[in-house]
Image: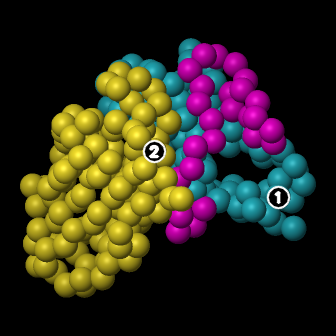
Chain colours: A cyan, B yellow
Amino acid sequence: GQNIDQPTEMTATEGAIVQINCTYQTSGFNGLFWYQQHAGEAPTFLSYNVLDGLEEKGRFSSFLSRSKGYSYLLLKELQMKDSASYLCACMDSNYQLIWGAGTKLIIKP
Amino acid sequence: DTAVSQTPKYLVTQMGNDKSIKCEQNLGHDTMYWYKQDSKKFLKIMFSYNNKELIINETVPNRFSPKSPDKAHLNLHINSLELGDSAVYFCASSQEVRETTDTQYFGPGTRLTVL
């Protein structure tokens, strides 16, 4: 079966760095997405990785290892507004997105 | 201007009723989707349309019927609503011709509560 695993909840301190991990098992692989979802709002796109390595975009970076079925989202210089759920999603061989349940990130002052 | 819009944002109704949720995108995208996000926060694909043609139809009760009058609109009609239909329904779109990996853009969601 297809499966996306990520921690349910994480807590971090304002100004710090946090890494949110995601492991996946899908039938085929056409890339991995990270989305941010604030409470009561729609998911918004953060990053897309299809090749191994690190993609950096401002304070956010995303890493992929296809051989390990593993990705992480790295958030630096955390701000209170970064409190949200972070959804990992893989695109399978049929180009369908398989979603994780999301990691709720709580930022404390 | 809102890229992907949905109406209504909140919908409260009684079991057994029929209701519709509307979705419109002004991004010129070819593909639109309906997702259901339940209390456990999993996003589950329900339907996908590409240029008004149904391309994904997951295991969804046939009480749910999508309708795409044109490629900018994908409405969701639900018959005989049940308690388990309570969830947030998201519409999304992507500039996708089949078999590509374009980013999906989501609407604000419709919170459906069935009493």
Decide if residue B111 is in sight here. Answer: no
> Which span of residues is magenta-colored?
A38-63
x and y percentages locating residue A42 in the rendered image: 51, 58
Q: Which residue is mark 1?
A: A79
Tell me, yes or no, whether the highlighted magenta stretch contains residue A55. yes
B52 versus A15 height, above or below:
above
The residue drawn where x is 27% and y is 35% is: B50
| SS label for mark 2 | loop
The residue drawn where x is 57% and y is 56% is: A37
Apparent side of residue A20 relative to residue A2 in the rendered image (left or right): right
The numbered mark at residue B13 is: none
Mark 1–mark 2 Cα distance, whole angstroms, equals 31 Å
x and y percentages locating residue A57 in the rendered image: 75, 35
Decide if residue A52 is in sight here. Answer: yes
The residue drawn where x is 39% and y is 39% is: B29
The quadrant of the rendering that contains the C terminus of chain A is: bottom right
The residue drawn where x is 62% and y is 20% is: A65
Q: Which residue is mark 2?
A: B27
Amino acid type, mark 1: Gln
x and y percentages locating residue A58 in the rendered image: 80, 38
The disc numbered 2 marks a residue on which chain?
B
B27 versus A61 height, above or below:
below
Say few, some or many: other residues with alpha carbon within 10 Å of mark 1 (under 14 / 14 to 19 / 20 or more). Answer: some
Does the residue at mark 1 contact the one at mark 2 (Cβ under 8 Å)?
A: no
Apparent side of residue B48 relative to residue A57 in the rendered image (left or right): left
| SS label for mark 1 | loop
Labels 1 and 2 positioned on one and the same chain: no
Tell me, yes or no, whether the highlighted magenta stretch contains residue A42. yes
